[in-house]
Image (cartoon, rainbow, N blue to C red):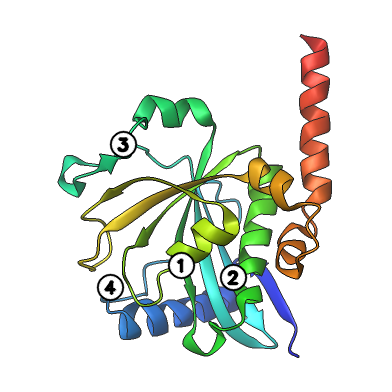
Amino acid sequence: MSVITVSKVLTPQDRLEALGVIEEVFVREKQWMKDAGEQIPEFLDGNLEYSWFLARVGDQPAGVMRLYYDPPLELPETCQVKFAPGIDLETLRAAGQYVEIGRFMIRPQFRRQHRVALRLMRVASAEVIERGYTHFITDVFEGEEHSPLNFHTRVLGFEVIGSHLFGELNCSSTRIILTLDIIKLYNRVKDSRSRLYQELVEGLRGKVEARNAKRRGLSAQV
């Protein structure tokens, strides 16, 4: 079995391989965008707003993910956002600090290897926890052939908070808005014997414990 690795996109070679994945999946296969060239900035080292991650199976690029820190929670009226009952912008803002997951894609030949997506989620979660953020927010397409909606909601525990009709990508499907409390997910699955969940939380324990210890220290000083 080939080794799955995930690295942050920082070098020109990483960027070139990540752009190749975007070109294959979002440009040619899905036709959701016309060109991948400007998706990833040439220089990402020290960029605190965006992080890009590249998964490899062996030496082959297999998937990418983008994190967007502190995204605007209020979308333009043209997006036609509808929140679920009991959800509004104030509720979201009060819940925590958000990081948006976007450009999350796996090349066709690796989609049956769920560990590729899990590794991307694990590495992304580790960075997010380390930076003190609490929630993921993302959009997934309803009814799209390879939509991760079921995986996100049934496996990871993302919650549906609303929907909108229009966005950046050229797709006619409704966008389902999802959020995930990262620590809530961790606490739910940390003691699970499931290999899938063990794969997800491996390497996160130290990050979460350090975060909790820091919070306890701050509480003791108040």
In space, the residues marked 1 and 2 are separated at their CA atoms by 10 Å
In this view, the residue in front, 3 or 17, is 3
Disc 1 secondary structure class: loop
Position of 106 relative to 73 (above/below)? below
**Residue type, label 4:** Met
**Residue type, label 2:** Ala
In this view, the residue in front, 149 or 93, is 149
In which quarter of the view is residue 30 placed? bottom left
> Badge 4: how crowded within 10 Å, few (<14), some, or many (20+)?
some
Which callout, 1 or 4, points at the residue further toward the start of the chain? 4
Identity of the residue drawn at 71% across and 75% down: 5
Identity of the residue drawn at 15% across and 46% down: 78
Name the quadrant of the C terminus. top right
Residue indicated by mark 2: 117
In space, the residues marked 4 and 3 are separated at their CA atoms by 23 Å
Are circles 1 and 2 on residues that touch, CB within 8 Å? yes
Q: Which mark is residue 74?
A: 3
Disc 3 secondary structure class: loop
Identity of the residue drawn at 61% across and 76% down: 114
Q: Is any part of residue 106 visible from this angle?
A: yes
Are circles 3 and 2 on residues that touch, CB within 8 Å? no
Which callout, 3 or 1, points at the residue further toward the start of the chain? 3
Are circles 2 and 4 on residues that touch, CB within 8 Å? no
Which residue occupies the extreme left position in the image? 78
**Residue type, label 1:** Pro
State which mark lies toward you, 3 or 1. 1
Q: Which mark is residue 33?
A: 4
The x and y percentages for residue 92 are 43, 32
Residue indicated by mark 1: 148
In space, the residues marked 2 and 4 are separated at their CA atoms by 22 Å
State which mark lies toward you, 3 or 2. 2
